[in-house]
Amino acid sequence: MAKYLLASASGMGFLCLIAGLSPVQALPHLEIADKNLAINQNDSSYQKNDSYQSNLTNSISSELLIANENQTNQDSGVDSAVKLQQPLTPQSANSSPSSDKLAQVTSVSQLSDVQPTDWAFQALQSLVERYGCIAGYPNQTYRGNRAMTRYEFAAGLNACLDRINELIATATGDLVKKEDLATLQKLQEQFTAELTTLRSRVDAVEARSAKLEANQFSTTTKLNGEVIIAGVGATGGAPNNSDSNIILVNRVRLNLTTSFTGKDLLITGLQAYNFLGGANGQGSLQQSLGLAAPLLSSSSARTSFEPQFPGLNVNTLSSVGANDVQLYKLLYIFPVANKLTLFAGTAAETSDAFPTITPFYGEGQESISRFAGLNPVLRVSGGTSGTGLASAAGFIYSISPNLDLRALYGSVNANLPQKSTDEAIPGVSTTPLGGGVFSGSSIVAAQLTFKPSPDLDIGLNYANSYHEINILGTGLISGDVGALAGVDAGTPVKLNSFGGTVTWRFSPNIALSGYGAALFVDASSNSVNASTTFTSWMVGVHFKDLFKSGNNAGILFGQPLYRSDAGGSAQLSPTGDNRATPYHLEGYYRFRVSDNISITPGAFVLFNPEGNSNNETTTVGVLRTTFTF
């Protein structure tokens, strides 16, 4: 009899496939436990404001993280991306292709319940309590005396077979009564079909688990990706310019997120894009409109997913070819105390550490313009260049559950030992941002993030910057280059920038969001006395799950950066411009085709583009398709 039981129970080791029992875990998972961290993704999106205490892994943008759209829309992605705090667990068995699914149960008898009054129920209950077969119930007893499906009953029976098999195998067979063995034999005969089906299900789970373990990418690293393909067209621009042709552009990002302890995070991001521009903007849409700066192609007509310096390595003014693969993100985040987290990297952006607050941020999923996504103070000094321009280090300190402080120091040309003596143009070196960690262009930035209520998020920003050349480094307007109008391009400048962003969710699906910013620019040269003040503001309404779950929309209006004051030798506007306040109006609707594909049509209109009424009202239309994986 003992041999018979051993043969019957062999290979049936999973008890927990039926109601109330723990599921099989195929792989270890990675927990990002420190909830005071936040990296904005990318991409992804979508934010982020629903959970202020997001992990540093959450806010990389959807930009950096790039996960599936529930991202899941967090509706994130690294944009996006991807929610990095998700465990690194395999896909569940029930989500496998339909061809792998188990056959349906077609026998009516297999669907009938086993009642508490049945002899089988009472017999198994006695065995469970006598031998402790089922550890999943408190005190190892059945509870509730409720009716059970035949499969639930078979799972319990299988557990008792395994338990008695274990007792016999460990030479404690004398503890098993002969009448219990007879009862088990009778139960096994009556539930043969259910036990056979249970064995096949367990075998299927084991096979899938083995396949996942054999083919998993890594036990410590998660791979996320985002692909953006977009058609962009525009009309208007500078006078006497013909409309540009419609262009088709792409940006591809692959992000590796690795944890060594379960609480830290190493982010490595690769990207390629086919936007053009280079040192003089050649081939860019902005240049064709006549709205780009003659150097570095800064413009208010730029899309959200376009790098700040397309086609150019701004550190050395060397060219970057279309779809060349670049390292755009390299950042390590690690907690050092209960409320303190540090981060450092050689390719980082301020949005990696600072919560974006506004729901319009998400280069692959939300707003379609560079203007709408972030407060300009976050973009100062190439803070969100899209290419991980700066080497940076900083901290995140959680003052309370509703208040935290974040700060960083960034150096743009930290990898260069010294500034080049060669000149690209008079007064501007071929390494225009200087060299060294503590020399050349640098920034100290801080953000105080406050959540006074579940529906209200507030971010206050300050940045102190030094630039080797006369530039803001935001990429938001053509006046970004030659920030001190009428002053030589090679004049170094200092910036003190202040900003605030607020989002109020006055209903579950509707949020009112806006920002304000002021940038104070002063010449940092003993031979030049010049100063300029730039201001900008934006207000908009964001709609979540509009018409259908997963579909988001936004409409917003505001003023791009504009010189509101000038002193010394600085001018309020470049010579030849007809000074006028610029305005930006934008609308978009993101349609989620599936968890991994979304399509966003949208357009933005520029009134008095670049603060010059000589320019025609300009409209930029975008049809963006985003794939996340």
Image (cartoon, rainbow, N blue to C red):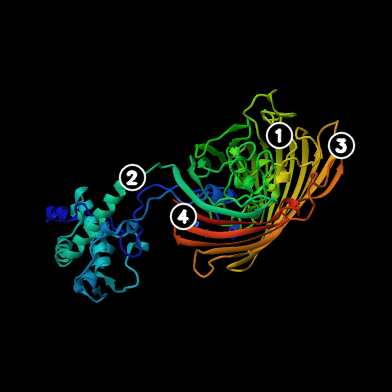
In the rendered structure, the answer to whether residue 275 lies left or right of residue 116 reads: right
Foreground mark, 1 or 2?
1
Q: Residue 470: x percent and y percent?
A: 75, 37
SS category of the residue bearing label 4: loop
Foreground mark, 3 or 1?
3
Mark toward the start of the polypeptide (3 vs 2): 2
Mark toward the start of the polypeptide (1 vs 4): 4
Q: Residue 443: x percent and y percent?
A: 71, 39
**Residue that mark 3 sits on:** 529
Mark toward the start of the polypeptide (3 vs 1): 1
**Residue that mark 1 sits on:** 441
Specify whether residue 203 is in view: yes
Q: Residue 195: x percent and y percent?
A: 20, 61
Q: Report the amino acid beneath label 3.
A: Asn
**Residue that mark 4 sits on:** 68
In the rendered structure, the answer to whether residue 9 lies left or right of residue 306 reads: left
Which residue sits furthest bottom?
117
